[in-house]
Image (cartoon, rainbow, N blue to C red):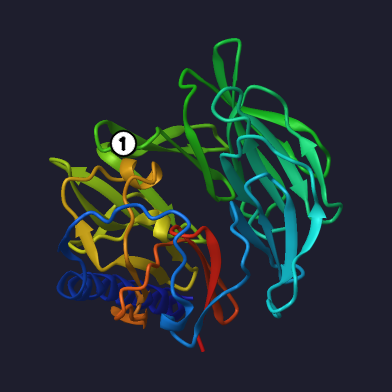
Amino acid sequence: MIVKKYIKFISLILIAVGIIWGGIYLWKTMNTPGSILNPQINKQPDITDLSSKLKMVFDDKIFDYWINSKNNTIYYLGDSGQISKISASDTSQKGEIVNSQNINQLNKVMPSPDGAMAVAEFNYPKLPTFSIFDTATNAWQPLPPNIIAVAWSPDSKKLAYLENKDNTGRIAIYDIASKKTQEVIKMTQKDLGLSWVKNDEMLFYETPSANIATSLYSLNTTNKTIKPLIKDEYGLTVNWSLDGKFGIKLINTNRVPSSVLIDASGNELASLSSLLLPPKCQILERAKIYCGIPKTIPGGIALPDDYYKNAVYFQDELYLIDLASGKASVIFNNRDNVLIDASRLTVNNSQLLFINRYDGKLYSLDLK
């Protein structure tokens, strides 16, 4: 037992050292100031300029996508809400429409961790409405009205939601199998985002803005206690690893954005001068980060505001950052300034999938 504890302690030390050296490496090798790129919606990259390992999965512009890990299938939504699927192991096939229902004013899609289900938010912003799509039945199941935000449990069996009813906020848990709901806690705050990173811990946060200081809180679902993890940061945005042990935090100091690696308690592990935008990264459980990192960072922009409003676009290179070894390597070198602005990165087997914000299409990078 002592030996196991010692090995675990040494492993944590090595990862921490790797994070620090990785931060130094990134600080030296990436982002330089540049000018703002004009938005070029629907402008398709020249495929002949792409690396032989990078390809467009299919020609359709999509709203969002996710992967069902149970059957290795990619599900994707068009702007009208129509859902199609395609095998992740053979994307040369034509996509199959599984649900043709139109959905008005789509705002967000939140897949369960295993990808067997997904929640869509629509009728936004006038009357936000949430429904669950089940890939087993290819059907929608409406959720109760007055919901503001939702988050899947790590085991994909439950759904937490924040409800604003009769001007009172509360967080409740909906069990998918039993279809029963259990209240967790009542709250005075009514406009929050939710994240469920551990079995007994949820996170809730205010809408991030470079102009407003916001905070991140932890809620223990067992004893129903709340504690602050990060307080009063401008532009506060966090993307967590799949196991909830690490996160990339974006903040602003005097309207200058910076990114920081943090642990599960919100403690800073490494501060990076190079800017890693949380929505452009995926952190895997084995302490590896895949990111689309802009070749240049414009001055005079507000982050994350301008990014979410599609007011700024970047030209990305794709990086793999190994926190354990501290190494950062380029996996797609954008020497030809191809119009790639990667978002919604997902690693599936030996592929890195992402949506290109320029043309709204799904791309795949071979990692072998």
Residue 248 rendering spot, x and y as whole percentages: 35, 57
- Which residue bears the numbered disc 1? 209
Which of the two residues, 88 or 208, is positioned nearer the viewer here? Answer: 88
Q: Compared to 25, does 238 lie above or below? A: above
Which amino acid type is marked by label 1?
Ser
Residue 24 rendering spot, x and y as whole percentages: 18, 72
Apparent side of residue 98 relative to residue 191 in the rendered image (left or right): right
Residue 281 rendering spot, x and y as whole percentages: 41, 62
Apparent side of residue 125 relative to residue 67 in the rendered image (left or right): left
How many numbered markers are drawn? 1
Res. 263 in view: no
Residue 66 rendering spot, x and y as whole percentages: 63, 59
Q: Residue at x 44, y 32 (%)?
A: 226
Q: Residue at x 63, y 30 (%)?
A: 123
Apparent side of residue 331 relative to residue 368 in the rendered image (left or right): left
Q: Residue at x 44, y 85 (%)?
A: 51
Res. 259 in view: yes
Apparent side of residue 294 relative to residue 291 in the rendered image (left or right): left
Which of the two residues, 43 or 144, is positioned nearer the viewer here? Answer: 43
Determine the image quadrant of residue 278.
bottom left
Q: What is the secondary structure assignment of the residue under circle 1?
A: loop
Q: Compared to 25, does 134 lie above or below? A: above
